Amino acid sequence: MRICQYLPIVIFYTDQAHLSFSIKRVVLVFMKKILIIDDNRDVRENTAELLELNHFEVFTADTGHRGYEAAKKHLPDIIMCDIIISGINENDFLSRSMAHQLIKNIPFIFFSNGSTDTSLQKYFPNSNQKYLKKPFAEEDLMQAVNNILHNYSDNLDIQR
């Protein structure tokens, strides 16, 4: 868990507007961050909207290069990545991510229009990575995200 999750938060206000603003700021502190990397704008925006409706802070990127930069900047709790991304070769994106000290421990959820056959195993070097076949249902998305958070969130924050 992040250290801020252990700090008690006490807010005393008499002004309703300030209270509302402060509560929103407090909620943002506790939201888990997810980065979505996909060159398909519709998939990226629809997935982001589903996650935001489920109280996640979402960042998006349309290329592998932008995704790598966003991962370094935001240090998300999960990276969702289309297996075939533009901008840089997906193997290069993964190797750069796995070599980066702070990104390498972030779990991935890969998704693609393709099948889940054994040829995709090269994209899953760690057990903390999941695969979703497009199009995926909201229930499948949320189950994958919640499973990763349940199994790996404590380890993520300790390793960062």
Image: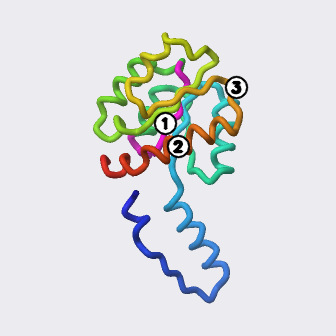
Depicted 13 relative to depicted 65: above or below: below
- Within the magenta stretch, is there residue 73? yes
Tag 3, which secondary structure? loop
Q: CA distance from mark 3 to mark 1?
A: 18 Å
Horizontal and vertical percent position of residue 15: 64, 85
The residue drawn where x is 63% and y is 23% is: 133
Closest to the observer, 19 or 3: 3
Q: Which mark is residue 135?
A: 3
Which residue lies at the image location 38% right of the left edge and 28% below the top edge? 126
Q: Mark 1 Cα within 10 Å, few/some/many (few <14, many 20+)?
A: many
**Residue highlighted by disc 1:** 79
Q: Which amino acid does the dot numbered 3 rest on?
A: Pro
User: Which span of residues is magenta-colored?
Assistant: 72-83
Q: Secondary structure at mark 1?
A: strand
Residue holding disc 2: 34
Q: Are marks 1 and 2 in contact (CB under 8 Å)?
A: yes
Pick out the residue farthest to the bottom.
14
**The residue under label 2 is which amino acid type?**
Ile
Q: Earlier in the sequence, mark 2 or mark 3?
A: 2
Q: Separation of disc 2 and disc 3 at Cα?
A: 19 Å
